[in-house]
Amino acid sequence: MRSLGTIPNRPEAIRKMVRKLREHGEPRFCYEAGPTGYCLYWQLSEMGMDCEVIAPSLIPTKASDRIKTDRRDAEKLARCYRAGELTAVAVPSPEQEALRDLVRAREAAKKDQLKARHRLGKFLLRHGRKPEGMKPWTKQFLEWIKTNVHFEHKAHEVTLLNYLHEVEHVALRILHLESAIDEAVREAPADMRAVIEALQALRGVAQTTAATIVSELGSLTRFANPRQLMGYSGLVASEHSSGNKVHRGPITKTGNAHLRRVLVESAWSYHHRPNVTGFLLRRQKSLAISDEVKAIAWKAQHRLNKRYKALAAKGKNKNQIVTAIARELLGFIWAIAKHTEQKQTANAS
């Protein structure tokens, strides 16, 4: 094993390195997933090279190793890759990555909205300004602030206007991003769009949630069974067992945090009794969802609602119950996605 030094991440430098390595045989490449994204992977793939992006958290490490340099990391990566001890991540397609970035931008905007509302709300509360019988953060509430909330000191007025402007600005950001998500879903590849539409047959899974699931997971058929998908999501219990002793703890929280968040949000809707009304009924009609997918979604409602009641009867707290429901919901998501992807493949052939 020998080092070639530091290679700049520029197309011409990469091409030069590949030509040099090809003089000694057909090279294979790998690098750690990180903030540099998949540009290097796509460039090497266009050149006909085998390249894999490695999950950093699954790289074997020695407990006694206290020296970390780029050169030592590269050598360790090469040795482990040659030994077959590394786990590659699923590289998204450019369309999937674009949708994922857009969905994550909306998620960031929602977090900013919560912070902005907290700042304004606590400011008003600190000064004893609270309307009676009015739901917060509605259009009426914001108009009440503009009309009735005034301060003697100019500094307080400037602070109020700044906080109010931030709340309104982030609301416009969210509307713009949601409109962009609608357009991105319409323009997505047919196979991706079909899965996003099919998942909306499930209760608690509207378009944004479905787009998040598909953009974060890609093709769900890469998971051989629902248990693999549940393990990937980090919603399974951690375990520390030895001999005859079996100890299971909280969920592992490994894998994709964005996926876990939307699943837990969707799982809350299953404490209601099964029915197909309102937004869910309109979604199923407007998207022309197949009877097979509707049957899976209806089975999910009965199964998950029954599971919710059973866990509640055992005295489990609501957060534990919803986490368990979210884990089982993944099984139905996998079933719908698999059915839809197989149908798309059959139609294409």
Image (cartoon, rainbow, N blue to C red):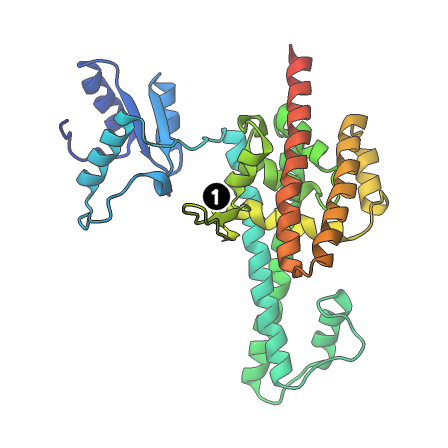
Indicate the position of residue 139 as horizontal and vertical percent values.
Answer: 75, 65
Residue at (26, 22) in percent of width and height: 15
* Element assignment for label 1: loop
Height in image: 159 above or below 179?
below
Residue at (75, 42) in percent of width and height: 303
In the picture provided, is 53 more to the left or to the right than 118? left
**Foreground: 244 or 246?**
244
Indicate the position of residue 337 as horizontal and vertical percent values.
Answer: 65, 29
**Foreground: 117 or 271?**
271
**Foreground: 270 or 164?**
270
| Quarter the C terminus occupies | top right
In the picture provided, is 109 more to the left or to the right than 347? left
Residue at (36, 39) in percent of width and height: 58
Picture quadrant of residue 313: bottom right
Picture quadrant of residue 49: top left
**Disc 1: which residue:** 255
Observer able to see residue 269: no
Indicate the position of residue 5 as horizontal and vertical percent values.
Answer: 15, 33
